[in-house]
């Protein structure tokens, strides 16, 4: 018993840990081969359920004793479903296979588990260094990553709390409970942890504000609204390792003195809701949540609130309104939630990744955390890298890595021998950066200085065929739809921005549009009430700043340099290259715009062409005769034979 | 009492008074639409009442500032005017300017702001986007004109102050946001006491009392009239 008359959390936890250890040893000691299978939403979407069935059926068929260990996401979404087969008796180290469908699963059971042949041509990499197979650690995708938040994702079974505990889970909570709340806050402050929800606010300071705010009741909220299109790391963490977030939330609650916590998840994340709800039940059953946690005087009840998925509800004051049952509209701050939040109680709101970072910080200490990342932004960043990049997916890197290293080394660069053009960072509120920024280190301050921002960690890589005006239009279309409609600048202003951008991409841009976009964008940033309006113009402002020529080409020359905006491009067939008598393009044109010329080559009727590009895709690579140009006036004139001659020409073909 | 400077003039007000209120009380006009006297947490949504306060990097809405001793306020800086003009233009770009046929003509806040900012009622640089339908006639006593409404929310707030629950609310989202009537599945049975506080507080002519003959339900004031069914 300690001086507060409570039990020693170490002793109480020891019993739980022993049980976890026993189960884990039993699992490890089992000589049967183990199949670790990723079962988060992304893997399920690429067919993990069928894969699982494939394995099970093959086990039955070949009478194999093996165990399936379902884990969360490993982050390699470019090649899911992923499995790791651990078959010690074969003499091989655990091996990772990619794109394992049911058929491949069957094949692997037969040849590896039964016959001991790991099928080298299908191996993605071994999970350990060895003499027989290349190891995944040789790929920069693996060795340049630094996993702090995602450390246990894809390793443990998210539905089994003992698996988490056996891997070191909940020992940080024990440690925190033995510390005074102020000491916990101090440790977090010392670590330099900054909020991963976008703005990078120092987490320790936020906690201190709430702890010192007057009032007995405090609340902590985990923000898992995650509304950015293309970002899914919060979902992935909740699906793959919910306990690390719950543990961080409990530590936060202890630190600020809260007995209530809420996890705000969007309802479109059913698996995340299910997994985290189950995790809370399990933790409560083991006495890691609920009353007298680990025998101490600390109580904590966690509710899961399902948000209806509006982007703006991720903004903290709108999120609070939404839990309180009002329309999700942001409120003017101050008062900040840390002073007056949910139902008026001082409330700490932290992002999933922030809370998931708290757990390892308490575990390994602030000094350890400070060694990772940069001086002003210690720790790691998680990006979901998508677009024109070879290895799309989730990557966790130490802060300070350059954009170039992330895009080219870790994610494999641009596919199809195309050139890099731009990268959009920070989701719809972020900015579009050109090649000259590739050596920018990734951290809150450096990115903000460029006009982009860390945001939620969405990253879209674009090659030379991406039109920057169109990209801005795309993001504005999103923010404009997600504006809550409360304040004038955002409600009406973003609508004008969108309409002007639409006009420009349609070839109807006017003199003065660029300047109008700039003025409106600046005023919307300065005048809007919440972060949505304040950041919505970023894609427009940055793309004008770094790709102004592209806007000018659209407006003054009616030309789309990236050959993307349909109204400003034309297709034609290069008669030098077109193969006489080949009909590949004719067959795919949806509007029958392709005709046969006098010498039995092909031409495109510009009046009929809808610029879908199907002919270009269909033209056999050895001819590669279809050209796309902008402006359409560059299309050379090709004479279309009158109807009867066309028939004659056709007749010659069939006759000849 | 706090003493502070507004445009180099010394003003006194209770510490904690909303700055916009204090200025208006002292005859210093700052364009405003969404503020109602007595609000403890103004919605700060119209974004008209910007001022510069010494020490702040950017203009701030004066309805969100509490008066403190010694603060220095400027209501007429180029930055403030820039934001106010843009906000005004934006509002007018979704406004059906037809003053001659509007009951609010001559007492309209938008006319007042236009005059004050020396800004035209019809924005020059922006396209005009109007909403359909042009009138919402679903309320038994009121008609609502979305293309006059500036979505200030004064009506929603005032109705909520007066009645246990507001019969008006924001509905739809973003650019399509409008004011709608709530409280009964069949609006003709709406428990609205017809106090027309909302009409009185509306800074423009967006809420208009139906002519007695057009009311779908007799108002307490004119029982005896035959109710006319809603025109569809
Ligand atoms: C429009 C908008 C959307 C936001 N969406 C999210 C979100 O989905 N998740 C999140 O954690 N923070 C989001 N934020 C930031 C939150 O308001 C808040 O700053 C954050 O949750 C604080 O957590 P942190 O200190 O851990 O970063 C959003 C902000 C804005 C303005
Ligand atoms: S900036 Fe946009 S989302 Fe934020 S309060 Fe204003 S209208 Fe709503
Ligand atoms: S109806 Fe009038 S008071 Fe109500 S929101 Fe519109 S302008 Fe404001
Ligand atoms: S009166 Fe201050 S923002 Fe509307």
Image (cartoon, rainbow, N blue to C red):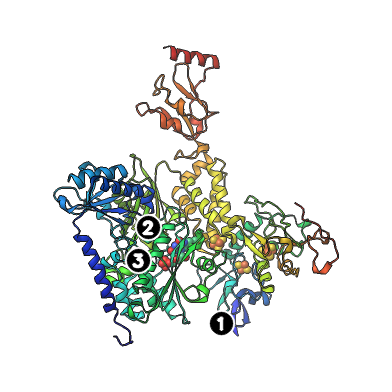
Which residue, as the protein is rendered here, is positioned at the far right? B224
Q: Is mark 3 within 8 Å of ligand 1?
A: no
Residue that mark 1 sits on: B69
| Residue in front for this viewpoint, A491 or B77 | A491
Secondary structure of residue under mark 2: helix
| Residue in front for this viewpoint, B170 or B56 | B170
| Residue in front for this viewpoint, B188 or A640 | B188
Residue B116 in view in this figure = no
Q: Chain of mark 2?
A: A
Q: Is residue B153 left or right of residue A315?
A: right
Q: Which mark is residue A236?
A: 2
Q: Is residue A344 left or right of residue A285?
A: right
Secondary structure of residue under mark 3: helix
Q: Nearer the viewer, mark 3 or mark 1?
A: 3
Q: Which mark is residue A64?
A: none
Quarter of the figure with residue A253: bottom left
Q: Chain of mark 1?
A: B
Label 1 CA crowd tier, 10 Å (few <14, some 14–19, many 20+): some
The residue at 13%/49% (across/down) is: A131
Q: Would you place residue B41 above or below residue B136 in this image?
A: below
Residue that mark 3 sits on: A243
Q: Position of residue A99 (x, y in %)?
A: 31, 45
Q: Is mark 1 within 8 Å of ligand 4?
A: no
Picture quarter with the C terminus of chain A: top left
Asked whether disc 2 touches disc 3, contact meaning CB atoms under 8 Å apart, the reply is no
């Amino acid at each position: 018993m300690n001086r507060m008359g409570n039990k020693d959390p170490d002793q109480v936890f020891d019993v739980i840990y022993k049980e976890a250890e026993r189960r884990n040893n039993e699992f490890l000691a089992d000589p049967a081969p183990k199949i670790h299978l990723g079962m988060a939403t992304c893997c399920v979407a690429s067919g993990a359920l069928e894969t699982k069935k494939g394995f099970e059926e093959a086990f039955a068929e070949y009478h194999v004793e093996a165990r399936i260990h379902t884990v969360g996401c490993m982050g390699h979404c470019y090649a899911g479903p992923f499995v790791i087969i651990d078959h010690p008796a074969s003499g091989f180290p655990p091996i990772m296979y990619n794109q394992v469908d049911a058929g491949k699963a069957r094949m692997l059971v037969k040849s590896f588990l039964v016959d001991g042949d790991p099928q080298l041509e299908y191996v993605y990499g071994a999970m350990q260094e060895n003499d027989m197979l290349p190891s995944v650690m040789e790929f920069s995708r693996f060795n340049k990553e630094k996993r702090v938040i995602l450390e246990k994702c894809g390793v443990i079974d998210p539905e089994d709390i003992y698996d988490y505990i056996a891997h070191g889970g909940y020992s940080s909570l024990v440690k925190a409970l033995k510390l005074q709340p102020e000491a916990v806050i101090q440790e977090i402050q010392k670590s330099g942890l900054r909020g991963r929800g976008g703005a990078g606010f120092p987490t320790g300071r936020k906690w201190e504000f709430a702890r010192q705010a007057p009032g007995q009741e405090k609340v902590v909220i985990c923000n898992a609204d995650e509304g950015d299109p293309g970002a899914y790391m919060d979902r992935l963490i909740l699906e793959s390792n919910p306990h690390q977030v719950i543990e961080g939330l409990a530590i936060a609650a202890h630190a600020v003195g809260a007995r209530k916590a809420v996890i705000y998840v969007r309802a479109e994340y059913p698996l995340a809701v299910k997994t985290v709800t189950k995790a809370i039940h399990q933790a409560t059953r083991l006495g890691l949540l609920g009353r007298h946690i680990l025998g101490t005087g600390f109580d904590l009840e966690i509710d899961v609130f399902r948000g209806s998925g509006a982007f703006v509800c991720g903004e903290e004051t709108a999120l609070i309104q939404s839990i309180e049952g009002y329309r999700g509209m942001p409120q003017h701050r101050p008062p900040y939630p840390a002073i007056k939040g949910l139902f008026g109680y001082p409330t700490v709101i932290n992002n999933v990744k922030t809370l998931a970072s708290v757990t390892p910080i308490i575990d390994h200490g602030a000094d350890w955390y400070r060694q990772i990342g940069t001086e002003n932004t210690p720790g790691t960043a998680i990006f979901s890298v998508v677009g024109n990049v070879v290895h799309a997916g989730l990557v966790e890197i130490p802060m300070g890595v350059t954009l170039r290293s992330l895009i080219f080394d870790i994610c494999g660069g641009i596919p199809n021998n195309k050139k890099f053009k731009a990268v959009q960072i920070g989701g719809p509120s972020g900015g579009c950066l050109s090649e000259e920024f590739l050596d920018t280190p990734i951290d809150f301050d450096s990115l903000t200085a460029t006009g982009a921002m860390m945001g939620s960690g969405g990253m879209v890589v674009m090659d030379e065929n991406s039109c920057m005006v169109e990209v801005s239009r795309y993001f504005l279309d999103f923010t404009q739809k997600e504006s809550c409609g409360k304040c004038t600048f955002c409600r009406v202003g973003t609508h004008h921005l969108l309409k002007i951008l639409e006009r420009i991409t349609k070839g109807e841009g006017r003199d003065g549009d660029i300047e109008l976009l700039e003025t409106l964008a600046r005023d919307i940033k300065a005048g809007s009430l919440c972060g949505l309006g304040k950041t919505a113009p970023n894609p427009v402002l940055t793309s004008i700043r770094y790709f102004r020529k592209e806007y000018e080409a659209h407006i003054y020359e009616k030309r789309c340099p990236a050959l993307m905006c349909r109204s400003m491009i034309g297709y034609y067939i290069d008669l030098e290259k077109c193969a006489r008598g080949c009909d590949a393009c004719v067959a795919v044109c949806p509007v029958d715009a392709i005709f046969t010329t006098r010498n039995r080559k092909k031409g495109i009727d510009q009046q009929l062409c809808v610029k879908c590009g199907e002919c270009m895709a269909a033209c056999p690579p050895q001819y590669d005769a279809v050209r796309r140009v902008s402006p359409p006036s560059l299309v050379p004139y090709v004479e279309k034979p009158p109807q009867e001659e066309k028939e004659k020409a056709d007749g010659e073909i069939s006759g000849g | 009492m706090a003493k502070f400077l507004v445009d180099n003039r010394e003003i006194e007000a209770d510490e904690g008074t909303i700055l916009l209120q204090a200025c208006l009380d002292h005859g210093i006009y700052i364009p405003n639409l969404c503020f109602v006297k007595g609000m403890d947490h103004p919605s700060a949504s119209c974004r008209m009442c910007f001022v510069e306060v010494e020490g702040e990097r950017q203009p701030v809405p004066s309805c969100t500032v509490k008066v403190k001793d010694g603060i220095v306020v400027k209501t007429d800086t180029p930055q403030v005017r820039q934001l106010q003009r843009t906000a005004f233009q934006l509002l007018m770009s979704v406004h059906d300017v037809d003053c001659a046929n509007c009951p609010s003509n001559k007492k309209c806040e938008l006319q007042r702001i236009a005059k004050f900012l020396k800004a035209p009622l019809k924005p020059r640089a922006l396209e005009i986007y109007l909403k359909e339908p042009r009138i919402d006639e679903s309320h038994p006593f009121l008609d609502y004109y979305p293309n006059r409404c500036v979505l200030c929310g004064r009506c929603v707030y005032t109705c909520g102050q007066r009645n246990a629950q507001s019969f008006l609310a924001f509905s739809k989202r973003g650019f399509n946001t409008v004011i709608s009537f709530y409280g009964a599945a069949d609006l003709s049975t709406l428990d609205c006491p017809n106090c027309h506080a909302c009409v009185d507080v509306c800074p423009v002519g967006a809420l208009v009392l139906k002519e007695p003959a057009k009311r779908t339900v007799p108002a307490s004031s004119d029982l005896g009239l035959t109710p006319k069914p809603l025109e569809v």
